[in-house]
Image (cartoon, grey):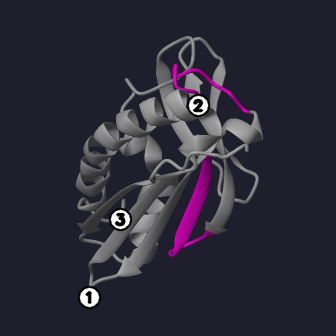
Amino acid sequence: MNRTIRIAPVRKSVVVQATPAQAFEVFTSRIDRWWPKSHGIGTAPVRESIIEPFVGGRWYAKCEDGTEAVVGHVLIWQPGERVVVSWEINAEWKPDPRPSFTSEVDVRFTADTPGRTRVELEHRNFERMGPAAGEKMSGEVNNGWPMLLELFVSEASKGTPA
């Protein structure tokens, strides 16, 4: 019998002082303002983080040496509501674009109270990496997403840029 071991998704949520449309815009098109330059998978330091705004678009970093490092690709693009991206990074924090090994990051934006949005993030499909690698990545992103979401909340609280 060949049975896949299911690894629980990592789920995090935050509430931001922004509308769903504003929060979505900060999370996606303003990712370079909050994603830390220290969190890159390329061979050189990150210069800029980018999510291309369409299904099939890349989530990638432009590095200081002129190279690009792909983090993943946009799977679902619903402005103001939801974005799902593949996470094409293996448990050694190296790029790995093989679809059978990628996990996914699903982010949903729901109005909470006037001017506030609940942002729910689910990072899932770790079992695709294999039991040991999947458990390792799950644990590491479980510890990493809270800090990243704090940075996102801080940027979102600044409002819409002029």
As shown in the figure, which amino acid type bears the numbered disc 3? Thr
Read off the residue under disc 1.
Answer: 114
- Say which quarter of the image contains residue 55: bottom right
Residue 82 forms part of the magenta stretch: yes
Does 69 sit above or below residue 30? above
Whether residue 88 is visible, yes or no, is no
As shown in the figure, which amino acid type bears the numbered disc 2? Ile
Crowding near the residue tagged with mark 2, few <14, some 14–19, many ≥20 C-alpha atoms within 10 Å: many
Question: Do the numbered discs 2 and 1 sit on residues whose CB atoms are within 8 Å?
Answer: no
- In percent of width and height, residue 133 lies at 53, 28
Q: Dot 3 lies on which element?
A: loop
Residue 35 forms part of the magenta stretch: no
Measure how far apart labels 2 and 1 are at the Cα level: 37 Å
Q: Dot 1 lies on which element?
A: loop
Read off the residue under disc 2.
Answer: 89
Does 113 sit above or below residue 55? below
Looking at the image, residue 116 sits to the left or right of residue 44; the answer is left
- In percent of width and height, residue 75 lies at 69, 57
Looking at marks 3 and 1 on the same chain, the residue that comes earlier in the sequence is marked by 1
Q: Residue at x 52, y 19 (%)?
A: 92
Q: Provide the residue span drawn in magenta.
A: 78-97
Crowding near the residue tagged with mark 3, few <14, some 14–19, many ≥20 C-alpha atoms within 10 Å: few
As shown in the figure, which amino acid type bears the numbered disc 1? Pro
Q: Residue at x 23, y 62 (%)?
A: 157
Read off the residue under disc 3.
Answer: 160
- Say which quarter of the image contains residue 158: bottom left
Looking at marks 3 and 2 on the same chain, the residue that comes earlier in the sequence is marked by 2
Q: Dot 2 lies on which element?
A: loop
